[in-house]
Image (spheres, helix red, strand yellow):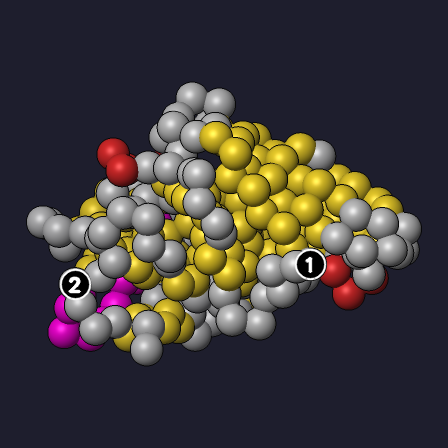
């Protein structure tokens, strides 16, 4: 399977600041990337789907102006949490897929965001 | 609407005992089914998947799952659990077509007692 990295693995920031999370495919051309958030003891909640070179598609209830997604290339997608607040504290996970992998998704290790 | 139900939030088994984690799904077409495992603070690792063929699929780490269309189930099994299997397990369903989102169950936390 594909190797997916996320950076940073853990970030603590002050309320009102913006945080960028990177998701990289190390050995795979990811034409589609997904961003999830996971609250403690809960399942994954899909936030958005992004295809390389086009705008992300956000799930209902997810603010696109707050969670900016840029799928800049076949190996990199970024999620920026703008003007972060304590309720944005969560575990953010990316996954990716490609035409050759049917609908199997390969997951990154996740980023723990804590907003003070 | 698509949905996945994992009825057991927590399961505790003794090391060496057998394991079965339940997964039921609701899906309007031929599903593509997955089991993922997540260790604390980590991403998800694929254990196994099913999209056609033999309804009993083998995965990594000695896990297997059986697709039963009549019961809309895809239960995960392991004949002998190891302490390192303690983790959270997620069942997911989605279409076979590339690029489509998956629907995840709520997860089952497995505890292994020695």
Query: In the visual, does B12 lie left or right of A116?
Result: left
Q: Is residue A68 visible?
A: yes
- Across and down, in percent, residue B52 comes to 13, 51
User: Residue B6, relative to residue A75: is it above or below?
Assistant: below
The subunit letter for the residue under badge 1 reads: A
Which label was assigned to residue A66?
1
Label 1 vs label 2, nearer the camera = 1
Indicate which disc residue B30 carries: 2
Membership of B19 in magenta stretch: no
Residue at 67 percent across and 40 percent down: it is A21
Q: Chain of mark 2?
A: B
Distance between the alpha carbons at the discs numbered 1 and 2? 36 Å
What crowding class fits label 2: few (fewer than 14 Cα within 10 Å), some (14-19), or many (20 or more)?
Answer: few
> Mark 2 falls on what kind of element?
loop
Q: Is residue B64 above or below residue B21?
A: above
Give the residues in magenta: B68-79
**Tag 1's secondary structure?**
loop
Q: Residue A1 location, x and y as percent? A: 36, 30
Quick one: A109 or A101, which is closer to the camera? A101
What's the residue at 33%, 49% (across, down)?
Answer: B99
């Amino acid at each position: 399977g594909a190797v997916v990295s996320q950076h940073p693995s853990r970030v603590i920031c002050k309320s009102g600041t913006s945080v960028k999370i990177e998701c990289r495919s190390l050995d795979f051309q990811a034409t589609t990337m997904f961003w999830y958030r996971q609250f403690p003891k809960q399942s994954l909640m899909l936030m958005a789907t992004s295809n390389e070179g086009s705008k992300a598609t956000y799930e209902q209830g997810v603010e696109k102006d707050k969670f900016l997604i840029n799928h800049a290339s076949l190996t990199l997608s970024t999620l920026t949490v703008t003007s972060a607040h304590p309720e944005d504290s969560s575990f953010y996970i990316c996954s990716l897929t490609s035409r050759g992998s049917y609908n199997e998704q390969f997951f990154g290790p996740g980023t723990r965001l804590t907003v003070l | 609407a698509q949905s996945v139900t994992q009825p057991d939030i927590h399961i505790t088994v003794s090391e060496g005992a057998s394991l079965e984690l339940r997964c039921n799904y609701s899906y309007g077409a031929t599903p593509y089914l997955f089991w993922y495992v997540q260790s604390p603070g980590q991403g998800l690792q694929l254990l196994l998947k099913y999209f056609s063929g033999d309804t009993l699929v083998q995965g990594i780490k000695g896990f297997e799952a059986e697709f039963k269309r009549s019961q809309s189930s895809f239960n995960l099994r392991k004949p002998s659990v190891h302490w390192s299997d303690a983790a959270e397990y997620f069942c997911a369903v989605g279409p076979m077509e590339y690029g489509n989102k998956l629907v995840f169950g709520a997860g089952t936390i497995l505890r292994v007692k020695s």
